[in-house]
Image (spheres, coloured by chain):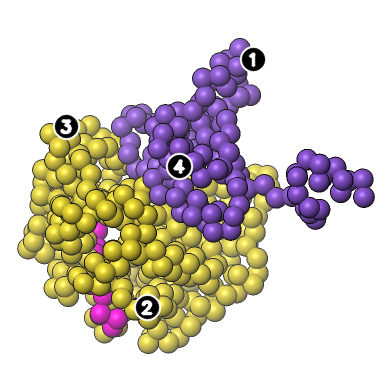
Amino acid sequence: MGYRTPSGDWHERTPYILSEMGFSYSSSMRGDDKPYYTMLDGKESDLVEIPSKWEMDDYVAQAYSVYPPEPAGLDRISCYRNVQDNDIREFRGYYDPGLCIVYLMHPQISGAPGRNLVLEEVGIKATFFVPGRTAETYPDAIREVADRGHEIACHGYEYENFGLLSYEEQKERIGKAVEAIEKACGKKPVGFRAPIGDLMLKTLDIAREYGMLYSSDLFDDDRPYFMKVNDAGDEILQIPMQWANFDLPYLAFNYRPAFPFGQGRVANYSNVLSNWKDEFTGHYNHHLCYTLQLDTQTSGSPGRNALVREFFQYMTAHEGVWFATGSQLYDFCKKIKKTEIEIWQAVYGAADLKKKWTAW
Amino acid sequence: MKEDAEWKKYSGQKVKKSAAMFTFDLDGDVIWRNMSSDEPNTEKLIRARSIGQYGPNRCVDMILDLLDQYGVKATFFVPGFVAECNPDVVRRIAGAGHEIGNHGYTHERFVEKTVEEQREILEKT
């Protein structure tokens, strides 16, 4: 009566076959954390889907074969105590809904208004970078995020690699993305982050032409700075980030196709939290600007949500931290640009800056 | 005892228990310029290179502060191209009493070069 699809994806007709053959449930999908009825031909069918997640799959942590290499990237076997720690954290997240936060952007769980939104709980307004097509597919979710006071910014149209597109193609994609976001939440985005892949200086110039005031794309600093994006000297604010302050390099996983490239093991949750804390503390001690990057689908499982929540609690326990959205940072930098920002640019650990942050 | 005397002679210091050498490779963005060369348009891609630019832009000063705090002199291996792009940074390192080492011109793979080419790279750097 039950079916689980073997490794690799299933065919779009597979659930129809299961239904016709009288299977009562499938446990094949990854995109939810509770059972649901499978939609067939736009209608709820009798076929129940009980999703399982990579987070709780021992294959992700323990499978190994030297030849042929398995998994594809032939990474080390994860140490048992690290796997157990992750399992316990996931179980606690599922067991205690009070630990959960909901990422409104997660397509499958966006319609669950009953859960706590940890951002609201700790009073943080965040910036959500949304691909245009996601805004077209989930306009209600995007509007809800915007209505709760968070900023919606542009993340390309369909997660394209801007490093590989011509000028015209880039222009078309950004134009379409801006339009889709405006349609979904009634407001034009003023921030831009290119999806994973690379981008060109002219990408930022196009973004500027479409009304973008800042970009959060580069890794070359730990404070925002104004950068020239064309020969005419037009500027855009750059709010840099770091791979270390991102959930994807530690936690993202897909078996086939292998993702990320090389298919490394999922990291130990407690150690990830420890890295995030170290980086935050370093930025805090040097009066810098800490940029955290989370993918809703990567940190979306209950155990990982609880992890992010623990991190937010750690951050908010520090005195004098200003939690700003991208456009708030832009306003700040624009205001201090003429005098102070040059000092800030020139002097490492500028003592004045602490006062500036505090005053703001 | 003989070793202690030798140590004293060369280090000019009292007898120590061990040696420790702090070394830094100041590669800047040359690794990304080289490694991404099988992708099209690499000279136009700004994100990958920004990862490497963080070193000379920000990290060197932080490292210099730290070394200064503990009174340690280190050796910085710098590709010639990075030195040309960041002359002030290299001067700050040397000015603080640290050593600058040769690290190729653009972080080349020496194993793929002829003897003549290797000499040329080392001299240019």
Region in magenta: A120-132
Q: Kindly identify the residue that appears in the image at 28 percent across and 63 percent down.
A: A353
Relative to the observer, which residue lies in front, A49 or B87?
Answer: B87
Q: Amino acid at mark 1?
A: Val
Distance of label 2 from label 3 (alpha carbons) = 42 Å
Residue A30, x across and y down, in percent: 41, 65
Q: Are discs 4 and 2 located on one and the same chain? A: no
Relative to the observer, which residue lies in front, A36 or A323?
Answer: A323
Q: Which subunit holds the residue at mark 4?
A: B
Q: Amino acid at mark 4?
A: Arg
Q: Are marks 2 and 3 in contact (CB under 8 Å)?
A: no
Number of other residues with Cα within 10 Å of mark 2, as a class: few under 14, some 14 to 19, many 20 or more: few
- Residue A190 can be seen, yes or no: yes
Q: Helix, strand, or loop for circle 3?
A: loop
The image quadrant that residue A191 belongs to is bottom left
Residue, disc 1: B115
